[in-house]
Image (spheres, rainbow, N blue to C red):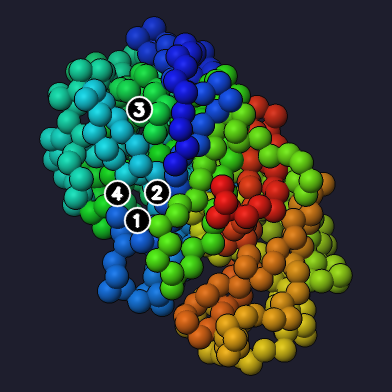
Amino acid sequence: MEYFILLVIILSVLSFSFLSTAHSLTELSTESNGFTTDLIHRDSIISPFYNSTSSHQDRIIKALQRSKFRADYFSLSSSASGNIPSAEMKAARGVYLMKLNVGTPPIEIHLYFDTGSILTWTQCAPCYNCFRQNLPLFNPKASSTYKTVSSNSKTCKFVDGSYSRARDNTCSYALTYMDNSYSRGIVSSDTLRLNSTLLRDFIFGCGYENAGTYGGNVCGIIGLGKGQGSLITQMGPTIGGKFSYCLRYHDPFSNSSKSSKIHFGNKAVVSGSGSVSTRLYFFRNVYAVGLKGISVGKKKLVLTNSLSNSSKILGLFNEKIIVDSGATLTYLPKKMYSALEAAMRKEIKLQHANPVDEMLRMCYKTPPDGKMKGIPVVTVHFVGADVKLSALNTFLKASESVYCLGFVPSNGVAVFGNLAQLNFLVGYDIKKMTISFKPTDCSKQ
C-alpha cells in the first residue's frame, strides 16, 4: 500500500459552473502529484464476493453473462435512430470493486468501479426497498457533514439521472440498469475518503429504493464517466482530468492477495517507451475510440471502412469501439470477428476442445505443460495507435484444462473488454480527450 503526504487544496466540486452556492467548493487532501488506490477483482481472494466453494467454471459463466448484459446495453443505447428504453437504462454492473469511506465519522462502503456510469450512489438508511447488504448501511443522520441537494439548484438540473422534487425541496434521482436493477433516492453531498485522499462536499446518490442481485457485498456504483457529477469531474483541476488503471492478471487457481491499481492526477500519466495514444470519444455515457482494423501476426484483416456504413444499429458508434472495464470479452463486428477466427485457426496447432459456454466459439485443450504455445500476436489498430495483444489478452482460461478465445461476434457495437486490457497501463485524459496504452507488468504496480 502506498503512503501519502496530506496536502489541502480548495477546488470546485465540478469543473463546470452548474453547482449551487451550497455545493460550490470541494476540499481535496492528497499528494500534489496524484494518488493511487486499489481495484479489487470480484473473484479474487481479497474480494468480499470470494466464495471458496464456487468453481472457476461457475465464475467464468457469470463473467460471460455480465459481458453480454453490457454488450446488449451498448447496442441498445447506440442505435442510429436514437430510440433507447424510456427508463434510460444504464450498463450492467462491473468486475472491479473500490473500497472507500463516506461521511463523518466515516463508514466503509464497497462500490462497483464503472467507466460507463456517471453518478456515484450507495444504499442509505432507512432503506425502504433495498437489496441485501452485509456492510452497515450509510445513515445520513449519523454524519455531521451530510447535506441534501436543493431541488432548485443547478446541481439538481445537471446531475445524471436527477430530477426536481419541489414538494420537500430535495433533488431526487432514478437510475435503471440493463439487468433491470435500479437505484432511486436523494442527490446528496458528504465527505468521501479514498485511502488518504479526502474529498469534501462530494455529490452522490443516497439510495432508499434499490434492487438487483448484488450478492450482499456491494453497496452501489462509483461512476468514472466524463459527465457532470462523476468522480473524475468532481475532482476537477487537482487531477487535471487524468486517471489510469492497470489490471493485473487474476489467476483463478492461485491465492494471491494482490489487487489491481487505479491512479489519479499526475500519477495517472501514461508515457515513455511503448506507450501509444489515440483520440477518446464520450457519448451516451461511455468512452470509445476509433477502430481501423485488426491483424493476426503480420496479416492485416478486414478494416472497418470496408464494413457497411449503413448499419443502423451501429449508429453513433460506427467505426468506433467502446473501451469498457466491466465486460470481460471483446466484441467485434461479425465480419471482422469471422476473419479473426479463421486466421487464428490457421495459426494455432493445439488440440481443439468443446466450449464451456455457448458464447465462446473457439477453444483449445491446455497442453500438458500448461503453456499455450504458438498463439499469434493480435494487433488492434486504433486510429493512430496499434495495441499488440499477447495470448494473455486474447485467450480466457475457461477451466483448468480449457482455454477459449476471448473475442466474440457482435450484432451491435464493438467493445474492447477488460481481458484485452490486462497488463496494460490504460490512461484517460478527459481534458485533452485522449486515451493511452502502455504494456506494463501490472503485478508490480
Q: CA distance from mark 1 to mark 3?
A: 21 Å
Q: CA distance from mark 4 to mark 3?
A: 17 Å
Q: Which residue is mark 2?
A: 97
State the residue in front, 215 or 366. 366
Check residue 47 in the rendering and tell me which mark sits there, or answer none.
Answer: 1
Check residue 225 in the rendering and tell me which mark sits there, or answer none.
Answer: none
Q: Choose the circle earlier in sequence order: 4 or 3.
A: 3
Secondary structure of residue under mark 4: loop
Residue, x 78% and y 49% (percent of image)?
Answer: 274
Check residue 192 in the rendering and tell me which mark sits there, or answer none.
Answer: 3
Q: Choose the circle earlier in sequence order: 3 or 2.
A: 2
Secondary structure of residue under mark 3: strand
Q: CA distance from mark 3 to mark 2?
A: 16 Å
State the residue in front, 270 or 60. 270
Q: Which residue is mark 4?
A: 218
Left or right: 330 in relation to 157: right
Percent position of residue 442, x then y: 58, 53
Q: CA distance from mark 4 to mark 2?
A: 8 Å
State the residue in front, 166 or 351. 351
Q: CA distance from mark 2 to mark 1?
A: 8 Å
Percent position of residue 431, x then y: 65, 27
Residue, x 39% and y 61% (percent of image)?
Answer: 44
- Identify residue type, mark 4: Val
| 2 vs 1, front mark | 1
Do labels 4 and 2 touch, CB within 8 Å?
yes
Secondary structure of residue under mark 2: strand
